[in-house]
Image: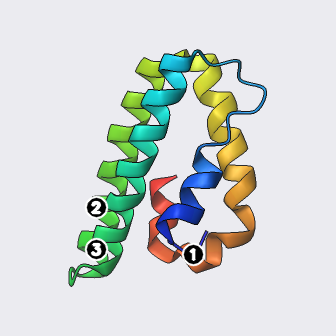
Amino acid sequence: FGLQTATDQQYLNNTDGLDLTTDQRDKLTKNNSSFVDQLMDITKSGKSDDDKKAAFLGLKNNRTKFLTSLLGNDLFKKYSGQILKSISPFKSKLGLAALAF
């Protein structure tokens, strides 16, 4: 998870054990693609660190709302736990972008 779009989406698209519907999986996959693109845009921007932090936290809040709406609280917590576990080894590479998770 070094912010490489296709590779990073693989981590986010892992829904093993969540028993999602096809519709949920499709919406999640689409949102993951957009999320990674937004992470990349913020990371590559010329913004100050403070502005990047604010942008990453805003992105996290919007994503949390989307995921909670799509999955419900219990599945959201389970999915988020899986993601945090899978990206843990890469947190140092993520830098400020880690705030979005």
Mark 3 in CB contact with mark 1 (< 8 angstroms): no
Q: Which residue is mark 1?
A: 2
Q: Which residue is mark 3?
A: 50
User: In this image, 3 relative to 13: left or right?
Assistant: left
Name the spot of residue 25 as percent of width and height, x first: 54, 27
Give the Cα separation between the discs numbered 3 and 1.
21 Å
Element class at badge 2? helix
Q: Which residue is mark 2?
A: 54
For residue 39, the mark is none
Q: Residues within 10 Å of mark 1 (few under 14, many from 20)?
A: some
Task: Name the amino acid, label 3.
Answer: Asp
Res 1 quadrant in image: bottom right
Element class at badge 3? helix
Q: Nearer the viewer, residue 23 or 61?
A: 23
Task: Name the amino acid, label 2.
Answer: Ala
Name the spot of residue 82 as percent of width and height, x first: 72, 42
Residue at 72% x, 62% y is 88
Name the spot of residue 15 as percent of width and height, x first: 68, 34
Q: Mark 3, mark 1: which one is toward the viewer?
A: 1
Residue at 67% x, 71% y is 90
